Image (cartoon, rainbow, N blue to C red):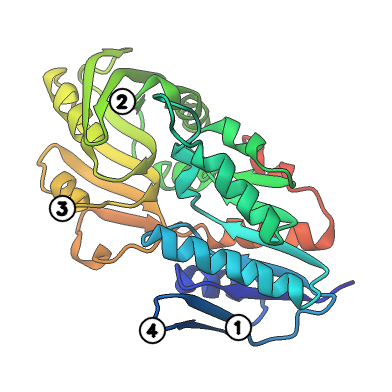
Amino acid sequence: MREITIFSGSAHRELAAAICHHLEVPLAPSRVTRFANDCLEVQLLANCRERDVFIVQPLAPPVQDNLVELLLMLDAARGASAARITVVMPHFAYARSDKKGAPRISIAARLVADLMQTAGADRVLTMTLHSPQVHGFFGVPVDHLHALHELARHFRGGDLSNSVVVSPDLGNAKEASRFARLLGLPVAAAAKERISDDKVLISSIIGDVRGKDVVVLDDEIARGSTIVELLDRLVEHDVASIRVACTHGLFSDGALDRIGRRDDVAEIVCTNTVPLPGAEDAPKLTVISVAPALAEAMRRIHNGESVSVLFDEH
């Protein structure tokens, strides 16, 4: 069997190191140079010839730098005669750009998928895409994991006898329903209208939440405008308690502090698909590692085993 070689871009070396720890494989060295004209150069400092190469790089801020770095690493691995190159991209930031919301707008998710394939990607391993249809934008095999099992395992440790799962919008209701089934809970959803990138309006909540312990589930939290609007509506429904969970905790523009300061929020739970600077200063934040799940998927890809069993609800 071909040997496995794992590289990490600059976006999240801590996660890459954790994955390597679970696989008992050393993290291969690489070097990134930024020239005076602001161009990047990447050099892979380990043998790639006829190897099964994995490149770990979430598209986390600064997204554009990390994307170009990933493309350069793919091109370098292909030029070094790698047998197969798999992009391990826990967070695909451009997945939000999946359709035209107005005339003359680029569908960036499809463009970036094409760029990765052109640069040399033979396969993609990702987690919790913002829209399921983004899976179809890739011309190479995609293994699309989710973090529902990891999040559910955390919440099973508490009392769920009076709980309900709430989706912040109808678009995420399917994932919220799957999460609710894992926990054996009912599900509710908010009717949301997005006014702009940082402003949303929630007109109603569909489902019974009054007096309940609410678990809000979203795929990602960036500015947190949707979550804050939902929290205001939930308070109006006299819920007993609120815990907020998401896969991708981007928490831009002070969102983590803004949500954490609220007395009605008991806990914020997210995974480590992206780096979380300042997490140690957020007492309500619980971070769950997805390194074991990604490592197991990578092991199965390398060994030619089924990855789909990791999607099963159990």
Q: Nearer the viewer, mark 4 or mark 3?
A: 4
Q: Which residue is mark 3?
A: 257
Contact (CB < 8 A) between labels 4 and 1?
Answer: no
Specify which label sits upstream in the sequence, 4 or 3: 4
Q: Is residue 168 left or right of residue 151?
A: left
Q: Is residue 31 above or below residue 99?
A: below
Q: CA distance from mark 4 to mark 2?
A: 59 Å
Residue 89 placement: quadrant: bottom right
The x, y position of residue 53, in whole percent, is 72, 70
Q: Which mark is residue 162?
A: 2
Contact (CB < 8 A) between labels 1 and 2?
Answer: no
Q: Is residue 152 above or below residue 285?
A: above
Specify which label sits upstream in the sequence, 4 or 2: 4
Contact (CB < 8 A) between labels 4 and 3?
Answer: no
The x, y position of residue 139, in whole percent, is 72, 43
| Residue depicted at x 26% and y 18% | 209
The x, y position of residue 243, in whole percent, is 27, 39
Disc 4 residue type (three-letter): Ala
Label 2 crowd bin: few (<14), some (14–19), many (20+), radius 10 Å: few
Looking at the rendered structure, the secondary structure element under dot 1 is: strand
Q: Which residue is mark 1?
A: 43
